[in-house]
Image (tube, rainbow, N blue to C red):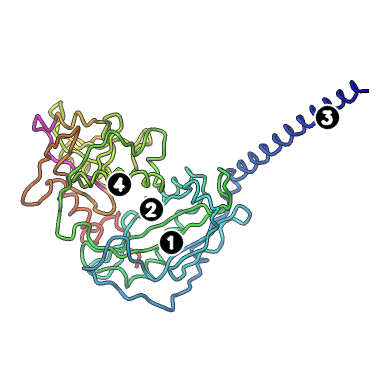
Amino acid sequence: YQRRVRGLKNIAKVGFTMLAKFLEKSRIHAIKKQQATRLSSKRFLSAFKASQLEIEKTKNPKQKIPNDKLVFGTSFTDHMFEVDWTQQKGWETPRIRPHGPFTLEPSCTVFHYAIECFEGLKAYKDKKGGIRLFRPELNMQRLSKSAKRLALPAFDETELLECIKKLVLLEESFIPTERGYSLYLRPTFISTETSVIVAPPGKAKLYVILSPVGPYYKTGFKPVKLLADAKNIRAWPGGTGNYKVGSNYAGGIVPQLECMAKGYSQILWLFNDQVTEVGTMNMFVLWVNEKGEKELITAPLEDGTILPGITRKSILELCRQWGEFKVSERTYTMTEVVKAIKENRLIEAFGAGTAAIVSSIETINYKDQDYSIPIDKELNAGRLTHKILNTIMSIQYGETEHPWSLKIN
């Protein structure tokens, strides 16, 4: 009798074990099926249309801030754009509404796993009152690529740009008229999936906010001092450095504070001694290389470490059109930069990005030693840096007609 009882217990134990394994496999299969469904082409079939845009105007217009009081990214316009997406319904109706908070569950995966990407571009007002955007289609393309990298749903780039145009036109009175001033546009795409499971989101929100901004350097060019950082790594091959995702930036805040505490303006990010980016900008060096060629060099995009900046792309295209020197996208090291400085072959260096366009570099600290970078004292910048700034600003403000400047009114 006891042997039979023990036998039955063993059978039951084996049965429960098998059942538990079966249930666990079923659970894993269900999760994988859900993830596969969310990544399938079905999630990309729907699209919102600018023609469906609903507009709710504010009843409490904000008082405009004088140009000389504008601080980058701290004040915002009356309205914002937003559109939601769900796995079940696809894209909902896009709308422009008064700028203000929206409610999210604390379990949204944007808070837990940084499923978020964004863009930065500007609207400019020319002397005749025309409103212009600078190469906005490239921002839409980059936002789409960033979203795909995070398993966020696809959207129609053209339709989003049309919605943004309507938002900018509605906020025309917030666009400063002086040269050097503009309206900063911040499209943002977040996961609103209410779950703490690491999985592709089944809900998302795409929104755009606007902020009037002044010139990056209010009193003219101000060259910066860099601290070359070999300890902290901003991005690495195969990572997300080539996508505009929020998680790329958060990790740089503490190193930047440490950099400023030592008396330097920005970090020059290194990877195995390779020069990558400066702060949140792309890095450029103009030198005479070891072959005796005058060359503008910047790090390449191939391995995914470098953000494909719109300003970066524009600078490369302009310099190749001018044909004054060799233009290269290739790997180079800080050791090579120091050698060029010591041999008086380095002509100038600068960072490039949306906020400043270009930023001249006057000093780089590497292994506890400061190295001076040549600066034209009259321009307070390098000559090429100054030429690039004037050329791009002339296009942005419609002073030079160019296909990069999109007039929207």
- Name which residue type carries label 2: Glu
Task: Name the kind of residue labelled 3 in the image.
Answer: Ala
Query: Label 3's element?
Result: helix
Crowd tier of the residue under label 2, counting other residues whose Cα lies within 10 Å: few below 14, some 14–19, many 20 or above:
some
Task: Identify the mark nearer the N-term, 4 or 1.
Answer: 1
Return the mark for residue 280.
Answer: 4
Q: CA distance from mark 4 to mark 3?
A: 62 Å
Q: Earlier in the sequence, mark 3 or mark 1?
A: 3
> Of marks 3 and 2, which one's residue comes earlier in the chain?
3
Tag 4 secondary structure: loop
On the image, numbered disc 1 is attached to which residue?
162
Residue type of the residue flagged with mark 4? Thr
Label 3: how many Cα within 10 Å (few below 14, some 14–19, many 20+): few
SS at badge 1:
helix
Name the front one of labels 4 and 3. 3
Compared to residue 403, the image places residue 348 above or below, namely above
Q: Is residue 292 magenta?
A: no
* Frontmost residue, 252 versus 342: 252
Viewer-nearest of discs 3 and 1: 3
> Of 233 and 210, which appears nearest the observer?
233
- Badge 1 or badge 2: first in the primary sequence: 2
Q: Which mark is residue 12?
A: 3
Q: Which residue is mark 2?
A: 119
Q: Quadrant of the C terminus?
A: bottom left
The region drawn magenta spans 340-352
Q: Residue furthest bottom?
A: 59
